[in-house]
């Protein structure tokens, strides 16, 4: 087959028998040839991780396992599917968890094997539902379609050579079948199961889309598209009709959970538009074309001063002070070398003649060791946990009034700002603030730049 389209469905779109019915309707309505990519059934990834952690700690994993069974069985029962479809995978899960409990050991490799059960089951369930609905479908584990990764368990990197393999395998699939493929998981050259990081099935969808050079990658989720701000904070945030690749990459990197941060990369590389759509907002029987719904990520997006806002929470902020910066041109090089060694990547950085302020993810790398080494070359001041507020828009390049408006509104609400940067691409402004003020800052900036119409 030649796939024209990727349709990726997230966990919340697959959480119940009822939502599976809806997903099946969206797939059957689409007349173009498509490859479907899925996440685990909603909540299952978390349950599997909790089960593994409990087994590792010598605690009872059964409540989590029972809940995994319950969610899957409900779909099997209500759609009249054969339980054999998933029995073996449930057994594999139990065997793995027994091993973890016996050894009291949970390596990243075993954790990936446990968590992969979620996606491996959801592909079988959805293809079962499609077949029952009269749409011939078959489930594939991503590696059987050629997706290979490195061995970095938990955050694996797909190998470039996967692309031609994916293309060759998909080419050979009967065009009358709809392939349903597991997102999020891959297999290493050593033959071990790997995962691409939480939320990674968006990234899988983009990888398959780029390898197959499809015309569009669709990400179906529980909101109607990319919104002007996180809807969990700003209740009345409206949908963004169009956004450029670069803006979408910045937004997802700085915390807009709707897309995994690496989704944009493969799509941008091949210039394939990505459309974000609401599984429960688009009506499968509505004649309105899909092409006019949701958000499309495409470089034809017209300029807007601010396209959207995002927040990244729980960031570590540090300040380095050193008189050595005055005469030592290699100072920053040494700082970055230390961070590289401890696998810490910097999100935001601002420098003056004698000090550097930067932020990074608190969960990344070996922070304590890095700080210790940095103390040898500078006075290190670690700040309490902070949040980063990010404003993205291609029009920022030309609008010089934005910062004045931002500070005016933030000052009115006594929101402290510790660091401000405008990136080299000049399409984003980042502000480092504290967790107590994040919500109000987001609300007032949303109000300022996206007033109710
Ligand atoms: P899925 O299960 O479909 O992958 P996710 O939960 O990973 O869905 O992502 C969708 C969620 O992202 C939304 O429910 C919303 O709460 C959150 N989100 C955060 N920022 C944004 C934003 N700017 N636009 C849309 N959704 C956002
Ligand atoms: N199921 C995985 C997760 O919950 C991947 C995904 O949803 O994209 O992280
Ligand atoms: Mg997601």
Image: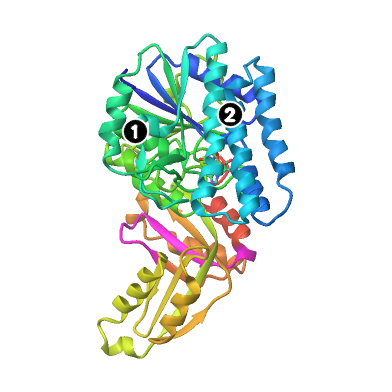
Residue 56 place in picture, x, y as percent: 64, 54
Q: Which quarter of the rendered picture does the C terminus lie within?
A: top right
Q: For the residue labelled by badge 2, is the local secondary structure a helix, a strand or a loop?
A: helix
Of the image marks 1 and 2, the number of the one nearer the N terminus: 2
Question: Residue at left 26%, top 89%?
Answer: 327
Above/below status of 377 relative to 383: below
Camera-side residue: 349 or 100? 100
Question: Residue at left 36%, top 91%?
Answer: 323
Range of magenta residues: 421-437
Q: Nearer the viewer, mark 1 or mark 2?
A: 2
Camera-side residue: 274 or 437? 274
Q: Residues within 10 Å of mark 2 (few under 14, many from 20)?
A: few
As drawn, the label of residue 146 is 1
Answer yes or no: is residue 225 visible: yes
Residue 53 place in picture, x, y as percent: 64, 53
Above/below status of 396 relative to 190: below
Quadrant assignment, res 428: bottom left
User: Disc 2 beta carbon < 8 A from ligand 2?
Assistant: no
Residue, disc 2: 88
Question: Residue at left 40%, top 86%?
Answer: 378
């Amino acid at each position: 087959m030649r796939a024209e389209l990727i349709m990726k469905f997230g966990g919340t779109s697959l959480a119940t028998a009822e939502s599976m019915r809806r997903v099946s309707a969206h797939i059957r309505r689409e007349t173009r040839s498509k490859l479907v990519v899925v996440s685990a059934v909603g909540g299952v990834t978390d349950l599997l991780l909790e089960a593994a952690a409990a087994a590792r700690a010598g605690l009872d994993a059964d409540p989590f396992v029972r809940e995994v069974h319950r969610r899957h069985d409900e779909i099997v029962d209500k759609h009249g599917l054969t339980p054999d479809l998933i029995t073996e995978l449930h057994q594999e899960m139990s065997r793995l968890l027994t091993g973890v409990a016996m050894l009291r050991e949970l390596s990243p490799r075993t954790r990936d094997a446990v968590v992969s059960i979620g996606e491996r089951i959801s592909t079988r369930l959805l293809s079962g539902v499609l077949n029952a609905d009269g749409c011939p479908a078959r489930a594939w584990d991503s590696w059987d379609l050629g997706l290979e990764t490195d061995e970095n368990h938990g955050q694996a990197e797909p190998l470039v050579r996967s692309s031609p393999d994916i293309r060759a395998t998909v080419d050979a699939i009967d065009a009358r079948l709809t392939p349903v493929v597991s997102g999020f998981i891959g297999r290493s050259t050593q033959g071990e199961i790997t995962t691409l990081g939480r939320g990674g099935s968006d990234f899988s969808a983009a990888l398959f889309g780029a390898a197959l050079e499809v015309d569009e990658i669709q990400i179906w989720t529980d909101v109607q598209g990319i919104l002007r701000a996180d809807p969990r904070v700003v209740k009345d945030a409206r949908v963004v009709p169009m956004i450029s690749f670069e803006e979408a990459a910045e937004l997802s990197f700085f915390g807009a959970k709707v897309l995994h941060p690496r989704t944009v990369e493969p799509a941008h590389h091949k210039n394939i538009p990505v459309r974000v759509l609401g599984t429960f907002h688009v009506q499968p029987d509505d004649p309105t074309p899909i092409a006019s719904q949701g958000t499309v990520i495409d470089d034809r997006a017209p300029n807007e001063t601010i396209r959207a806002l995002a927040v990244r929470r729980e960031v570590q902020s540090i300040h380095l002070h050193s008189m050595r910066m005055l005469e030592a041109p290699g100072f920053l090089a040494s700082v970055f070398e230390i961070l590289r060694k401890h696998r810490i990547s910097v999100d935001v950085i601002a420098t003056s003649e004698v000090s550097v302020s930067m932020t990074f993810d608190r969960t990344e790398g070996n922070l304590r060791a890095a700080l210790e080494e940095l103390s040898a070359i500078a006075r290190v001041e670690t700040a309490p946990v902070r949040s980063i507020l990010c404003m993205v828009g291609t029009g920022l390049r030309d609008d010089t009034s934005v910062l004045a408006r931002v500070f005016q509104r933030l000052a009115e609400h006594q929101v402290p700002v510790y660091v401000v940067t405008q990136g080299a691409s000049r399409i984003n402004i980042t502000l480092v603030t504290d967790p107590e003020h994040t919500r109000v800052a987001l609300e007032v900036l949303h109000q300022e730049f996206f007033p109710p119409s």
